[in-house]
């Protein structure tokens, strides 16, 4: 009996497990990315539109601003009256719709990324200050966040742009100053958690300045959360810009903006629906890709994310 029990429950031999190699955090993240369908789909959409914007002059044979009134309102190629000369047709001024769509991706991405950068700077500074200092600073920042959340972003943007005047620069500044609240709320909580870590206490004990602790010890550990929020805010800024352009208060003609293209095509929507459908689908794909990418980044970077 003793021999049987010994054979079924052998004692671990010396050195057992020394050859086991555990994956690094980077390897785990890459493995999660390969398995996350939403992240892959979002990344493909965003990368394709980004490449379309970068190589716009190579993809379109026409100038998006050139008008040909003799060729106005030519339907897309899938229509019986369509032609491959203009695969997506022309608009009411005879401008090639494919060229305006491709160059419009530049406008949407430029506005989305610019607004996100402005919002990131404002929200990061407010959120980190509230989380690090606490007390009266935290109360003041929370009061500012409450005021911002009480003001509808679209209505404020419409009022300010109507007062100042619509242009790409004005839209970028106004929207960037209106979408920082998510950065501030999330980073405030994360900064409070990081401030209780041992390496932050060690930096204080070593006599490091407040700025060094905030930007060299705390900020690098907020990078993952920053990237997740940034992708979501890009999509939000693109939608807000499209809404302002649709109302005639955003990017001004003849700049090819997807929201402006929808606005210009609304008069012909019953007879030439492609004028609204084409830029609308492009806007939907870009915003959907940004949101899928943001959700995927949240999953693959979180400790409890999908394995």
Image (spheres, grey):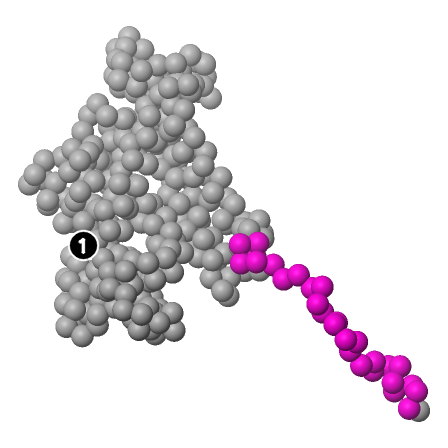
Q: Residue furthest front?
A: 206
Q: Secondary structure at mark 1?
A: loop
Question: Is residue 201 placed above or below 8 in the rendered structure?
Answer: above
Q: Report the magenta residues as a range.
A: 2-28
For the point 38% across and 73% down, the residue is: 198
Q: Residue furthest left?
A: 163
Res 101 → quadrant? top left
Image location of residue 51, percent across then percent down: 43, 30
Image location of residue 205, percent across then percent down: 31, 73
Question: Is residue 113 placed above or below 217 in the rendered structure?
Answer: above
Question: Is residue 118 placed above or below 48 in the rendered structure?
Answer: below
Q: Residue furthest bottom?
A: 1
- Quadrant the N terminus occupies: bottom right
Residue labelled with disc 1: 152
Image location of residue 278, percent across then percent down: 37, 30
Res 135 → quadrant? bottom left
């Amino acid at each position: 009996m003793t021999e049987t029990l010994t054979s079924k429950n052998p004692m671990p031999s010396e050195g057992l497990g020394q050859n086991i190699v555990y994956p690094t955090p980077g390897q785990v993240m890459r493995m999660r990315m390969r398995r996350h369908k939403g992240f892959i789909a979002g990344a493909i959409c965003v990368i394709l539109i980004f490449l379309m914007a970068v190589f716009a002059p190579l993809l379109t044979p026409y100038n998006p601003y050139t008008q040909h009134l003799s060729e106005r309102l030519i339907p897309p190629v899938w229509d019986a009256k369509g032609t491959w000369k203009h695969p997506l047709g022309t608009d009411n001024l005879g401008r090639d719709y494919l060229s305006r769509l491709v160059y419009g991706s530049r406008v949407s991405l430029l506005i989305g990324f610019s607004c996100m950068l402005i919002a990131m700077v404002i929200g990061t500074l407010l959120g980190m200050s509230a989380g690090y200092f606490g007390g009266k600073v935290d109360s003041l920042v929370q009061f500012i966040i409450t005021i911002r959340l009480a003001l509808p972003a679209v209505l404020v943007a419409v009022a300010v742009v109507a007062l100042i005047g619509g242009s790409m620069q004005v839209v970028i500044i106004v929207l960037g100053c209106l979408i920082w609240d998510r950065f501030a709320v999330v980073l405030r909580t994360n900064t409070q958690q990081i401030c209780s870590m041992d390496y932050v206490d060690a930096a204080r004990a070593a006599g490091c300045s407040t700025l060094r602790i905030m930007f060299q010890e705390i900020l690098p550990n907020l990078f993952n959360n920053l990237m997740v929020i940034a992708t979501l805010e890009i999509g939000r800024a693109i939608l807000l810009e499209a809404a302002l352009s649709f109302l005639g208060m955003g990017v001004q003609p003849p700049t090819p903006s997807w929201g402006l293209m929808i606005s210009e095509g609304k008069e012909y929507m019953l007879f030439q629906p492609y004028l609204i459908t084409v830029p609308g689908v492009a806007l939907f794909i870009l915003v959907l890709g940004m949101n899928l990418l943001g959700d995927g980044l949240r999953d693959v970077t979180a400790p409890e994310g999908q394995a």
